[in-house]
Image (tube, coloured by chain):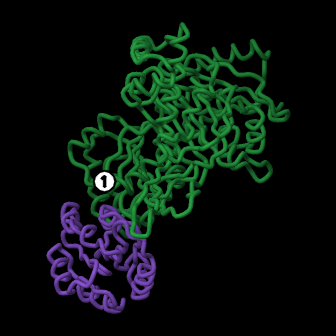
Amino acid sequence: MENSKVKVVLGVIGADCHAVGNKILNYALTAAGFEVINLGVLVPQEEFVNAAIETDAKAILVASLYGHGEIDCRGLKERCREAGLGDILLYVGGNLVVGKTDFTEVHNKFIEMGYDRVYEPGILPDQVVIDLKNDLGL
Amino acid sequence: MNNILLIDFGSTYTKITAVDIEKEVVLGTARGITTVETDIMDGLNQAMEALFLKTGKLEFKKVLGCSSAAGGLKMVAIGLVPELTAEAAKRAALGAGAKIMGVYGNELNEYEIQEIAQLQPEIILLAGGTDGGNKEVILHNARMLTTIGKDIPVIVAGNKSVAPQVIRILLESMTEVVHTENVMPKLNELNIEPAREAIRGVFLKRIVQAKGLNKANQFVDDVVMPTPAAVLKAAELLGKGTDYETGLGDLMVVDIGGATTDVYSIAKGDPTKSNVALRGLPEPFAKRTVEGDLGMRYSATALFKAAGAKMIADYARVSTQDVEAYVKKVEENIEYLPQNDVERKVEIAMGRACTSLAVERHVGQLETIFTLLGSAFVQKGKDLSAVKNVVGTGGVIVHHEQPKEILKGATYSESTPEMLKPECPDYLIDEDYIMASMGLLGEAYPDVAVRMMKKYIVRR
């Protein structure tokens, strides 16, 4: 039954057009048994939230690769809370900031912004699948 | 005997068109006043007499009707997220030719239920949740609808996982509950055709009778659809053609009335330029939008507000005072027709403003996004810039001396480059005012309807 699958929303946030990683994650998550609602690239925050409401998704996976991640990702948690999605899992990954900033700093910043997991460049999709299954108790 | 009579019970006039489907000619057209309050047959007989004066006595092998009498088909659309399922439900209702009284999203509250009751919809379309998606909201809304204290037909087109429950809840207080496919089975996947069919089914079964249109039944074989649905059907036939008769290709239809302006487009609307990403809800191939604030008489003041005096004055090349004075005049007396040169200019400019704004709200928009790799574009809605044919129909355009001047408002303008309006279309006029009739005829004789429209809807 297709519809009993756990749904996750996936997309590249803001003015970012990087599509390759998005396709790989879509493939890996689908293969792992999730129903992926892939919003593609150039996705505004509100579209992530709307998609999650309408599809009853359990997690939102946000990617940002062009260095403006902090600006684009800020406020998504608040928006989710406002829309009644306070419990939804928020993951974020990619090249979240420009330059060689220490990742611990980046990690802490995004955790503070309300994200449940923050991934640095080079992480394999398998890790995301394992974390999702753990966090959702699957 | 190859004569068919096609009737459009309009809000003001009952318009009839007699056609010979063998020779593929219009035998004659005529109109009477719509008399839905007393006996719908009075106005029809009046029109028939006028017709027979022109053509002599005719016999018909078939009589078909469409109706927008008594306020049209009044509907309320309900969904979950306003931009998603609520929008999809609204589009389904518009495509079915309905007059949308209200669109509601999220969980309905008591005030909204009261409001819906006051709007007196004839059909409610209830959507919400993708298949397997959100269940709570549509269940909540179904329970709320049972408290409305009225028996209104409801069409359920939401999350299939809870559809049976939703229907059981509604049946506690409603007698007519119809189940159909989800208007949005997957996120951003529009599926409005089944809902449109369901609306038409309820219209045939319930509304025709409730509006007293069935009194015409001894004479009319069937009042088959609301008038806007007939026009949409005609536009679709004219654009797409049939297996045996080619159509004109992508097209747009503009219908300006006293109270509203309708725009129809028959086109996929994919991006025509490179480096464009599509966003938002997919658009129906045959799309209809209605603007309640753009019209030539009842909505003259609303048009004046929406367009601004300057826009109308610039089109007409008269002063803003002249525009203001004329708008006041026609609003006070809706029968008023222009009496001098200035007024004629303002009248044309008002029509052009209706066209321009209604088309701008209908077409897609292009937004520029600046990225590290240069600029990229995001398109929302349909790109109609390559559409080659713009058809004008409806009383205001059809009876006008310079309909092309009014239709010019549909074209792309350099002052609003983000609006994806037709760039260099031809203008066609439905001179004999037969589009709704051809939509009706097209149900049974699609090839004939396409050929007749190609003959009678002419380039200007």
Q: Please say whether residue B39 is visible from this viewpoint.
A: no
Rendered location of residue B390, percent (x, y): 63, 38
| Image quarter in which the C terminus of chain B is found | top right
Compared to B431, does B252 lie above or below? below
User: Which image quadrant for residue B107?
Assistant: bottom left
Chain bearing mark 1 = B
Q: From the rendered image, report the letter of the chain displayed in purple.
A: A
Relative horizontal placement of residue B167, taking residue B413 as reference (left or right): left
Residue B426 picture quarter: top right
Report whether B124 appears left or right of B25.
left
Q: Colour of chain B?
A: green
Q: Which residue is mark 1?
A: B142
B251 up-or-down from A97: above or below: above
Q: Name the side, left or right, on which A7 lies relative to B143.
A: right
Binning the other alpha carbons within 10 Å of mark 1 as few (below 14), some (14 to 19) or many (20 upward) gives: many
Residue situated in front as seen by the camera: A2 or A50: A50
Position of residue A110 measured from the top left corner of the image (x, y, whole percent): 19, 77
**Residue situated in front as seen by the camera: B144 or B332:** B332
The answer to which of B344 and B103 lies nearer the viewer is B344
Residue A100, horizontal then vertical, whole percent:
26, 85
- Residue sitting farthest toward the top: B339
